[in-house]
Image (tube, rainbow, N blue to C red):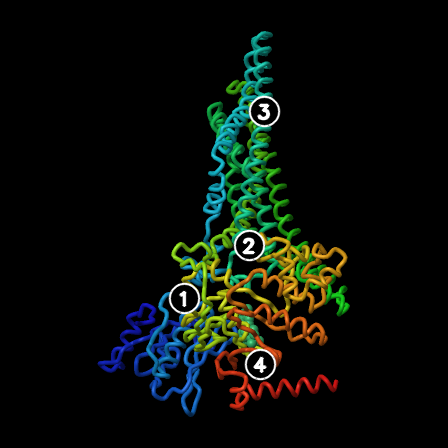
Amino acid sequence: MQLSDPLPEKIQNKLDPVLEPNEEIRIALESDMDAEGRFAPSWLIVTDQRVMTLGLNGRGGDLAVPLSELTKVEVEPLVGGSCLEVSTAEDTIPLIRYSQSRSDRFNEAHRGIEQQIENKPFLVKTEFPRVVCEKCGRRLPTRDGLCPACVSKWHMFGRICSYLAEHKVKAGVMVAMFSVLSVAELLPPKITQLIIDDAFATKNMELLFWYVAFLAGLLVLRWLGEMTTGWLSAWLGARVVADIRGQVYRHIEYLSLGFHDKQKTGGLLSRVTYDTRNVRSFLVDGLPFLVLRWLTTIGIIAMLFYTNWVLTLYILIPVPLIIIWGKVLYRRLRVFYTRLWRRWEGFYTHIQESLSGIRIVKAFAQESKEVGRFRRNAWSMFELEYWTEKQWITYFSTMGLLNFLGFVVVWLVGGQQVLGQELTLGELMLFYFYLHMFYGPLRWLGRVNSWMTRAMSAAERIFEIIDTEPEAYEDANARPMPTTRGEIVFDDVTFGYDAALPVLRDIDIHIHPGEMIGLVGKSGAGKSTTVNLICRFYDVDYGAIRLDGVDLRDIRLEDLRGHIGVVMQEPILFNGTIRENIAYGKPEATFEEIMEAARAANAHHFILAKPDGYDTILGEKGTGLSGGEKQRVSIARAILHDPRILILDEATSSVDAQTEKQLQEAIGRLIKGRTTIAIAHRLSTLRDADRLVVLEQGRVVEVGTHEELVARRGHFYHLVRLQRATAEIMEVA
Ligand code: ADP
């Protein structure tokens, strides 16, 4: 096994003379920074005997340290990257510095060196998700995601249009009606010419009548065409956006917690609302305009060339200029639209956070500060929006000027030709009308480009979500597990929210079916993380967790989560009735079942004392209930759900003795016959647990019954004494 970037010849030549004949290269990675953080490639080489760094271009000090001398290897986070450091008995040596984009590989190198120091088998990952774009080298917003700079506008356009494919008939009728409409728009100037040149010149009344009748027919056709295409595009636009919106929202719900940890809620909210609205306005307003104008413009140019190609050439002179300018402006504004979106994201996030935390805002009398922040956000958006609009207005006005220049040319050059009898008066009028039809939309073409830019960058953000791998709910290879005994085994599990910084290390725990385990440890020791891993909210980095001997990653997620019930420290209740809240995990439950669960949770009496009983509506996050009441509702919910495995994140908040007793009884009934993992704070729980697992800095330091651990006088004993001392202080206070 080798973790290696392709070795350039220069490095190979440098290596060959220094390597011993039987020395094996295990890691060879290129970094992108030197010790001062400047861009300068250098190499980390790890063999089965030593670690080395080699610089290119003579820069960067080359060094080599035998593995046998190393005591420790660490990743030191720095600004804009990290540094891999090794320690010997005397010294700590900064080995190599690298940017964030290379951190995946260097984290593995870190593990690899660690394994070698500890004389463990050399096992490292050699495949990594893409973090930078291969084309432009920019950092990707999401791993294995799309590069916003390289993704083509047309690609996005095609992807939006692919949603139209589901509504083929309507889309087909719309395109056909557009063709009819463009013919109906193109013909009236030609008929005007014929009226002037044929009917007027020959003073033929009947001819005039037929031409006018034809014109009227065209007007009716145009009216019909405009209405049908309008209806169809409104329907298709709204429908496609409803489809996309549904898909994005569904996807957001199914994305892993790891994804949600990194996203701002406001950003997701604005993708579902603001971005989808932009795509819709493009589909309803922009796309029909674009199609119709292109069809008509092609028709006009053909007609003009056919009538008088010399005059046409004169008129077309400014066109390349307009197109180039439009393109340049579009490129510049694209960046600004992305910036504007970022501001929108911040804007939404701020509103969402400050309104959902309105209690805290009020408790700290921070209303004016929040209003000030809102104003600043709104102001910065005003500046950016004004700037982009200003650019467009300059563009439009100048387009208007060029348009006018076209008319000057028609009157001057065309007028001369009329006087020289090379052009008829009717043909001059034809040019005049077509010029109107040609330049008018051309002026607006920039605007469509702007709609398109907005819509495409919105689409980009939407597809970014849709393309992110969701949790594997529908993995066809996953094993169904309709029942479980509830045996959970942690087999050498290592996990970190960021792979470089493991939060849990080498965890081995065997939890027997029906056993109650208390997880104990200081705050930040990794208790909640252990529980998160059992629920498979995150996947382990190394090792495996098994339920009844099957790796969690191989079990159908729906089955796994169906077997687990969670009672949290701060129960999450939804805006709805108490009854709905209890039945959240089992919506089909009968009222009798709900009441029975509430009774078992000691909640029935307090619920009946509420004005509307079980139909009492709770506010957002369960406002209207006390802490103890919320907990009992959530216990009732877990009892009704009837899971085989129970996760209990105990309340630390002190409740009165009566409530405490009721809670204790309810929990006692709840855990009966289930495998329970309790994050234990209260001494009573610690005594009830069959075994306690003591965590410290992500490692299991002690396992045993309460009595055993107290007798051992180790970590647990120390923790209990600390807790007692705190309790005494609290009592005195
Ligand atoms: P405990 O439950 O024992 O208090 P946790 O499991 O919550 O500890 O946390 C263990 C470590 O993991 C802490 O250092 C904490 O900061 C970190 N951590 C917890 N949740 C996240 C998260 N979603 N993203 C990044 N780090 C986290």
Q: Which amino acid, mark 1?
A: Asp
Task: Identify the mark at residue 335; answer none if there is no mark.
Answer: 2
10 Å crowding of disc 1: few (<14), some (14-19), many (20+): some
Q: Residue at x 61, y 73 (%)?
A: 650
Which disc number belongs to residue 89? none
Closer-to-camera residue (431/41): 41
SS state under label 2:
helix
> How far, Cα to Cα, is label 3 from label 4?
81 Å
Residue drawn 69% across the image and 87% down it: 728
Which quarter of the picture shows residue 665?
bottom right
Mark 3: amino acid: Leu
Q: Is residue 285 in view from this perspective?
A: yes
The image position of residue 193, as x and y in percent, is: 56, 18
- Dot 1 or dot 3: first in sequence order is 3
Q: Amino acid at mark 2?
A: Val
Crowdedness near tag 2: few (<14), some (14–19) or many (≥20) residues, C-alpha within 10 Å: some
First in sequence: mark 2 or mark 1?
2
Closer to the observer: label 3 or label 4? 4
In the image, taking residue 467 as reference, residue 233 lies left or right, namely right
Marker disc for residue 224: 3
